[in-house]
Amino acid sequence: MKGTSWLAVIVLTGCVAIYALGSATHAYRLAQLRKPVDDGLKAMPEAKRQGVAVELSMGFYIANAAMLPDLCKAEGVDLTGYVHDFTQRYSADYDNARTVYTRLGGVESMLVADIHSATNTRGTFEHIVGTVAGLHGDKAHRADDCRSIMARKDKVVDEMNFRELFPYAWGATGLP
């Protein structure tokens, strides 16, 4: 199972959903951004689909619970409150996904290492922090972008719901 190349698309889609909050075109934009994920999963052999969908779910959680805070910490911004709220809300989904992943033969520590070492994923992730905040998205303004995420943490946590952002991918995990 190697779905982590999809992680950048998943994270980007979730972040753009936040950026589009309140926009009249929010549903349309989200549907357009989901399409490559859904189409990619649908095109996979059924035997691989569940494993990749579970990896996507786990990667989405890891990006929010670890990658984003690490990135912002490097900019001097503490996202402890965001991480606390995010993990409180979604840790049960992650635990369930991890159980399925292990049953399918996946090794969580290898997935986590793969996600953290994927430079293309990390580079994309760093670039879209600005999209989350709706600000600059460049390194010079990253701390401002991180502060904006923290200032809107309740809204961000609400929107970063994998099962709602990616209903087809969630359904493919086989989780309730």
Image (cartoon, grey):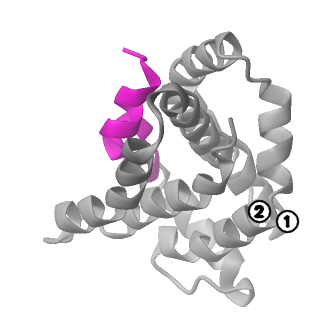
Q: Let me know if residue 57 appears in the view.
A: yes
Going 82% across and 46% down the picture, which residue do you hit?
A: 114
Secondary structure of the residue carrying numbered label 1: helix
Going 51% across and 54% down the picture, which residue do you hit?
A: 10
Dots 1, 2 in contact, CB < 8 A: yes
Q: Nearer the viewer, residue 100 or 62?
A: 100
Residue for badge 1 = 74
Q: CA distance from mark 1 to mark 2?
A: 5 Å
Going 86% across and 42% down the picture, which residue do you hit?
A: 113
Give the dominant element type of the magenta stretch: helix, strand or loop.
Answer: helix
Identify which amino acid the numbered label 1 is placed on.
Ala
Q: Nearer the viewer, residue 36 or 157?
A: 36
Estimate the x, y position of residue 124 in percent, counting from the top left: 66, 71
Identify which amino acid the numbered label 2 is placed on.
Leu
Report the span colored magenta: 155-176
Left/right placement of residue 44 relative to residue 142 reads: left
Q: Nearer the viewer, residue 63 or 51?
A: 51
Q: Let me know if residue 88 appears in the view.
A: no
Left/right placement of residue 77 relative to residue 82 reads: right
Residue for badge 2 = 71
20, above or below 171, in the image: below
Estimate the x, y position of residue 148 in percent, counting from the top left: 54, 68
Residue occupying the far front of the picture? 45
